């Protein structure tokens, strides 16, 4: 299958499809076809109020439907309105920066002062270049390096580099390795890096006073994690990274994920950690038992426990084979 953009790891093809942004891009021919994407405009963005000063900005790309689950191509953006200006987490696909700016005018008269990028995928950073050069752009240091290159998502085609096309505008201007705090008091934001997962630069964004977490695509939704190994993903380390996040992040009531259609909870994140651990262990057990990747992919079914939790098998959109291969190749003994 030809793969395109990755929503992290679901790639279905189209110019910019994404099941978790990166994962669903792909399918030039026999792949999944999402809804017709809307033309970029503020009216195509829906602002969902999560707290008095925190909004999820939904929309901005195709919608892939699997069962009763909608999988949006564009990453979930969040606007945190502070006394100094708007802190925006992620900027969706190229062309959606200005529509985000226009939409924010419905919510506040303050300008965007800071962009935080959860990771380097196009469906999360594509709009960066449309913001004024004075806006501070913050990311984990590995994500910043990956954004300079914008190398293809694993299995996907060469993609344009919007930052190069705009003379470096929109690239991170401030980075962190493991931890960074922005702002103070009720406007504090804590950024964390817990290790490799969906890429090698996945940031976790916490709004402590609001008890809200944006997990980016490290927790994109209830499905097999998309592993963009070309941008540093690790299947074997994934469950450890989630476990570190679960252990470290306290006092959070609301989890905003990279692509899921509603907000979730820390209990859901914990379950996702268990799901990824079981999935990795199942692949490793198959390899150690002398089976093949093809055997595993053909035989694998979502465990019933996770079906009950609302997990979805996206294999109609994109095979799990690439993710299985990543884990397989990381398993040396
Ligand atoms: Zn992603």
Image (cartoon, rainbow, N blue to C red):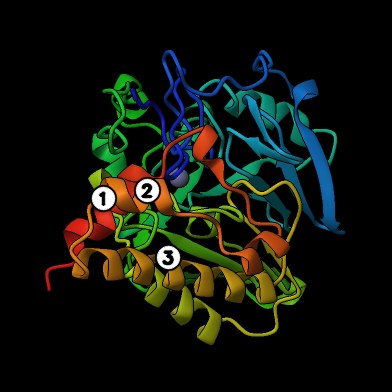
Quarter of the image holding residue 215? bottom right
Q: Nearer the viewer, residue 252 or 311?
A: 311
> Which quadrant of the render holds ligand 1?
top left
Residue 228 seen by the camera = no
- Badge 2 vs badge 1, beta-carbon distance below 8 Å: yes
Residue 297's disc number: 2
Q: Nearer the viewer, residue 22 or 205?
A: 22
Q: Secondary structure at mark 2?
A: helix
Residue 148 lies left or right of residue 248; in this view the side is left
Disc 2/disc 1 C-alpha distance (Å): 6 Å
Q: Earlier in the sequence, mark 2 or mark 3?
A: 3
Residue 293's disc number: 1
Q: Which-is-in-front pick, marks 1 and 3?
A: 1
Disc 2/disc 3 C-alpha distance (Å): 12 Å
Does the numbered disc 1 mark a residue whose Cβ is under 8 Å from ligand 1? no
Q: Quadrant of the N terminus?
A: top left
Image location of residue 173, percent across then percent down: 37, 49
Q: Residue at position x 44%, y 39% from top?
A: 23
Q: Secondary structure at mark 1?
A: helix
Q: Residue at position x 50%, y 53% from top?
A: 217
Q: Secondary structure at mark 3?
A: helix
């Amino acid at each position: 299958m030809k793969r395109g953009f990755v929503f992290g790891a679901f790639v279905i093809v189209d110019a910019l499809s994404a099941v978790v942004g990166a994962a669903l891009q792909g399918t030039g021919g026999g792949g999944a076809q999402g809804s017709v994407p809307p033309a970029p405009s503020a009216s195509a963005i829906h602002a969902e109020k999560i707290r008095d000063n925190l909004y999820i900005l939904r929309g901005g790309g195709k919608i892939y439907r699997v069962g009763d689950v909608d999988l949006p191509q564009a990453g979930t953006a969040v606007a945190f309105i502070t006394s100094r200006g708007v802190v925006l987490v992620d900027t969706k696909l190229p062309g959606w920066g200005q529509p985000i700016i226009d939409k924010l005018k419905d919510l506040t008269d303050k300008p965007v002062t800071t962009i935080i990028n959860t990771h380097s995928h196009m469906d999360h950073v594509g709009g960066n270049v449309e913001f004024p050069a004075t806006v501070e752009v913050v990311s984990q240091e590995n994500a910043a390096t990956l954004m300079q290159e914008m190398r293809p998502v694993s299995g996907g085609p060469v993609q344009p580099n919007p930052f190069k096309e705009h003379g470096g505008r929109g690239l991170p201007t401030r980075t962190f390795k493991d931890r960074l705090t922005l702002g103070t008091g009720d406007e504090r934001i804590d950024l964390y890096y817990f290790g490799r997962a969906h890429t090698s630069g996945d940031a976790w964004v916490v709004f402590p006073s609001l008890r809200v977490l944006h997990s980016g695509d490290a927790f994109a939704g209830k499905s097999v994690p998309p592993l963009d190994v070309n941008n540093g993903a690790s299947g074997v380390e994934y469950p450890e990274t989630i476990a570190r996040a679960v252990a470290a992040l306290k006092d959070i009531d609301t989890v905003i994920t990279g692509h899921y259609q509603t907000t979730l909870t820390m209990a859901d994140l914990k379950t996702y950690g268990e799901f990824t651990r079981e999935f990795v262990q199942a692949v490793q057990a198959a390899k150690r038992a002398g089976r093949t990747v093809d055997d595993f992919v053909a035989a694998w079914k979502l465990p019933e426990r996770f079906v009950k939790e609302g997990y979805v098998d996206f294999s109609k959109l994109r095979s799990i084979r690439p993710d299985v291969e990543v884990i397989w190749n990381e398993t040396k003994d």
